[in-house]
Every structure is written in structure tokens, then in C-alpha cells.
């Protein structure tokens, strides 16, 4: 049996990142301007009801057919970070006999090599803060990373809506 290597993990990360990029491209095509996300957190991106989205916590699950990609948004809406479990699940690594503990061991080696990093920023008070995601080191250094910007109605906007009576 083939041992899962650092290169294999980097390939799996790249495949996951490509799927997240595609999912967020689809999300950008949907007009969320009349949707209050706090109330309507899931729906379909397309009029044929083929691409489903569900916003959750800090992220989103996008499903088309039997393929799903689950991801969290990073600082400022960054989409180039990855959660190891989401990446593991997306690539169906369990189906080919790769355990999650193997992935975390290899990820630890890549962190030591400084190939991937755990995100962090310093707050004004000097406290370190992480969004919980990992990044390829080269992506983390990108001063213009890929981001997802969502324009939607806020709950506060409903009180200004003439169609809603108090």
C-alpha cells in the first residue's frame, strides 16, 4: 500500500482549495441582496436547484450532486485557508484507507517545515488570535488573497422595510 506523503497532502490541499474557489465563485453569482442571512441560511444558487448552499458558523457547505465542499471563511473573508477535517472529508481520504491521524501527523511535519502555517494575527492589545485555519505559507503571505464578500440584508434593515409592519 502506498504511504501518504507530504506531497500527497499538498495535492489534496490544492484540490480542496480549488473546490472552495469554485464554490465561492458560484456563491458570488447569487444575488443575496434581498436575503436576510440570519433568517435564511440555506437555499439554492441556481434556478435549476442543482447547487445547494448552507451557511453555518464561520463558513458554508456547498453541494452539487454527490459532491460537497465544506469550508470556513478566514480573516476578512479569506477563502484560501483550510480546515484539516474539511479537507480530509472533501478528498474522501478515509475511503482510500488514510486515517485522519495520519493527516494531522503529516500536517505537523509541514508546519515544522514551514510549508503550512496556522493562521494568526496580533490584536491591538498584543494578543495573538487565530481563525482556526491553516494556510499554505505562500498563500498566507499574499497581500491580496482571494476573498468572499457577501452583500445581504441585515435584520436591522427589516425595520426600515415598508412591506413589514411593526
Image (cartoon, rainbow, N blue to C red):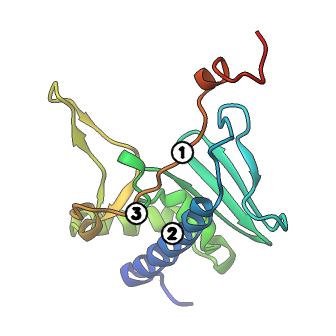
Tag 3 or tag 2, which sits nearer the N-term? 2
Q: Where is mark 3, residue-wise?
A: 80
Residue 115 visible? The answer is no
Q: Position of residue 96 (x, y in %)?
A: 65, 80
Q: Where is mark 1, residue-wise?
A: 151
Inter-mark Cα distance, 3 to 1: 20 Å
Circle 1 packing at 10 Å, graded few (<14), some (14-19), many (20+), is some
In this rendering, the answer to whether 50 lies above or below 44 is below
Residue placed furthest toward the bottom: 1
Q: Where is mark 2, residue-wise?
A: 21
Instruction: Tell which of 109 and 47 is nearer to you.
Output: 47
Inter-mark Cα distance, 2 to 3: 8 Å
Mark 2 element type: helix
Q: Quadrant of residue 93?
A: bottom right
Q: Residue at x 42, y 50 (%)?
A: 77
Instruction: Tell which of 5 and 1 is nearer to you.
Output: 5
Q: 64 left or right of 2? A: right
Of tags 2 and 1, the one toward the viewer is 1
Q: Position of residue 49 (x, y in %)?
A: 84, 63
Circle 2 packing at 10 Å, graded few (<14), some (14-19), many (20+), is some
Amino acid at each position: 500500500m502506498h504511504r501518504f506523503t507530504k506531497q500527497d497532502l499538498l495535492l489534496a490541499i490544492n484540490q480542496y482549495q480549488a473546490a472552495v474557489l469554485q464554490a465561492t465563485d458560484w456563491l458570488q453569482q447569487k444575488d443575496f441582496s434581498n436575503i436576510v442571512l440570519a433568517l435564511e441560511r440555506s437555499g439554492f444558487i441556481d434556478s435549476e436547484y442543482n447547487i445547494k448552499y448552507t451557511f453555518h458558523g464561520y463558513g458554508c457547505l456547498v453541494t452539487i450532486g454527490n459532491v460537497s465542499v465544506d469550508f470556513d471563511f478566514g480573516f476578512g473573508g479569506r477563502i484560501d485557508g483550510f480546515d484539516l477535517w474539511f479537507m480530509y472529508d472533501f478528498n474522501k481520504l478515509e475511503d482510500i484507507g488514510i486515517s485522519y491521524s495520519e493527516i494531522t501527523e503529516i500536517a505537523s511535519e509541514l508546519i515544522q517545515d514551514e510549508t503550512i502555517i496556522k493562521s494568526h494575527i496580533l490584536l491591538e492589545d498584543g494578543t495573538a488570535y487565530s481563525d482556526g485555519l491553516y494556510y499554505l505559507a505562500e498563500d498566507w503571505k499574499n497581500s491580496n488573497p482571494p476573498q468572499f464578500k457577501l452583500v445581504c440584508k441585515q435584520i436591522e434593515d427589516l425595520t426600515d422595510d415598508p412591506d413589514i409592519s411593526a
